Amino acid sequence: MISTGQQRYMLLSNVTTGISPYIPGANFNDLTFYFVGTGTISGGTVVIEEADWDVLNSGTMPGGAWGQVTTVPPAGFSAGATQAVHLQRGAYGAVRVNITSPLTGGGTVTVTARGQD
């Protein structure tokens, strides 16, 4: 049997706003986020963020130290579409999804992530 070395995370489920739990980015060489829409999504702002977190020396996350990695256009996952976002290899301490402006149009989004070590 081949080991895939992958982990899957459920981050947000059928929401129009919210901040996902963080993923320890240092665990992975490759990280992909999957955004799946339900219904029509006509607006809103969704970002993937990172924080500098030293998992080996600190058990607490920095509160306001999150920075934007990329913006994910909601039109890409409207009406049941799936949009995959692949992060470039980097030395991420922690990553999360933040809907900084609520989704509009009546639809919702579910976000999962898959990491490859």
Image (cartoon, rainbow, N blue to C red):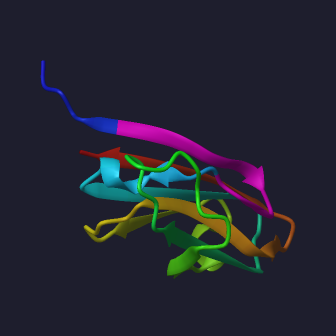
Magenta extent: 7-20
Judging depth in this view, the residue of 89 and 16 nearest the camera is 89
| Residue 68 left/right relative to 40 | left
Q: Which quadrant, please, contains the C terminus?
A: top left
Q: Residue lying furthest top in this view?
A: 1
Residue 41 vertical placement versus 37 (above, below): below
Residue at image coords 36%, 66%: 86
Magenta highlight: main SS? strand
Q: Nearer the viewer, residue 60 or 91?
A: 60
Q: Position of residue 21 (x, y in %)?
A: 63, 50
The picture quadrant where one finds residue 89 is: bottom left
| Above-or-below relation of 104 to 20 | below
Image quarter of the N terminus: top left
Q: How many marks?
A: 0
Residue 111: percent from left, percent from top: 59, 53
* Place of residue 71 in the rendered image (x, y in percent of width and height, measured from the top left): 55, 81
Identify the image quadrant of residue 92.
bottom left
87 w.r.t. 14: above or below: below
Q: Is residue 13 magenta?
A: yes
The location of residue 36, given as percent across then percent down, is 60, 56
- Give the residue at x 58% y 50%: 60
Does residue 27 appear left or right of residue 103 in this picture? Answer: left
Q: Is residue 72 left or right of residue 8?
A: right
Most foreground residue, 43 or 39? 43
Q: Is residue 96 magenta?
A: no
> What residue is drawn where x is 61% and y is 48%?
11
Q: Nearer the viewer, residue 21 or 13?
A: 21
Outermost left residue: 1
What residue is shown at x 67% (from left), y 72% (from top)? 64
